[in-house]
Image: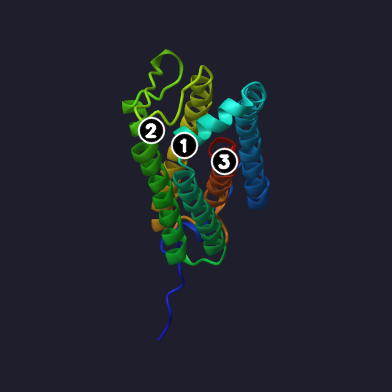
Amino acid sequence: MTTATPTASTLPYHETYTHQEHWRNQEDEFEGAKLGVWLFLTTEILLFSGMFCGYAILRIFYLEHFTAASAHYLNWKIGAANTAVLLISSFTVAMSVRAAQLNKQGQLIINLLISAVCGVIFLVVKLGWEYYPKYIHHELPGKNFAYADHTGAYIANASDPVFLAIYWVATAIHGFHVLVGVLLLLWVAWRAGKRHFGPKHYTAVENVGLYWHLVDLVWIFLFPLLYLV
């Protein structure tokens, strides 16, 4: 009795993947793609660095007011919960890359989906527990700010809209990046379901993972700057 030899049509995609013609080999293609992602992430770092610089300058001018506004308008427990969610997602993203390297297809898909779910939880918490209540109470930047404290425990000052402007702009841009990351993770998970990734080819898993780690890292800075000042 003879055993049939696997052919290209029966092997999974990652086993038969070949590099594009303009690359010398598959390793060069992988390194080139990763370099391109790192260059893109550098521009993202520059984007958020501008926000951090603006925050630093404004906080110097409104130090006491920023501290009071942060304690009043933001709940550090919500920020801490979202921080924990993103840290879990970073771990599962790293595990998904390792699963692809070891050809553990089930673990690859599960870890990618857990990461995506964590991203969705982050957005739901941000929208439901922070953005919506602030919107209905007019805790918005600029002329949309109309704060009224009926308890008398906090007196709003002229710099509150400045703090809220930084909060809304920084967290909204970061939230958009989280949304993009969730969509990328779901796309990679869908491809993983078709067995596109394995020890010989996991470029997309690695690069999407790098993007997700940057998104998590930015939040690690935003959380203390906004919630723990």
First-in-chain label (1 vs 3): 1
Residue type, mark 2 in image: Tyr
Residue with the mark numbered 1 = 74
Residue found at x 67% / y 41%? 35
**Colour theme:** rainbow
Quick one: 166 or 211, which is closer to the camera? 166
- Residue at point 45% right, 20% down? 141
Is 206 above or below relative to 9? above
Q: Nearer the viewer, residue 182 or 203?
A: 182
Q: Residue furthest front?
A: 152
Give percent across and percent down for residue 225: 59, 36
What kind of element bears circle 1? Answer: loop
Q: Mark 2 highlights which residue?
A: 131
201 shown above or below 99: above
Is residue 47 something one can see in this rendering?
no
Residue 110 screen position, x and y as percent:
42, 61
Other-residue count near label 2 (Cα within 10 Å), few / some / many at <14 / 14–19 / ≥20? some
> How crowded is the residue under tag 3: few (<14 C-alpha within 10 Å), some, or many (20+)?
some
Q: Which residue is mark 3?
A: 228
Label 1, label 2: how far apart the Cα atoms are: 11 Å
Residue 46's quadrant in the figure? top right
Query: 135 or 160: which is nearer to us?
Result: 160
Q: What amino acid type is highlighted by mark number 3?
A: Leu
The one nearer the camera, 164 or 82, is 164
Question: Residue extending furthest top?
Answer: 143
Q: Tell me which amino acid carries mark 1.
A: Leu
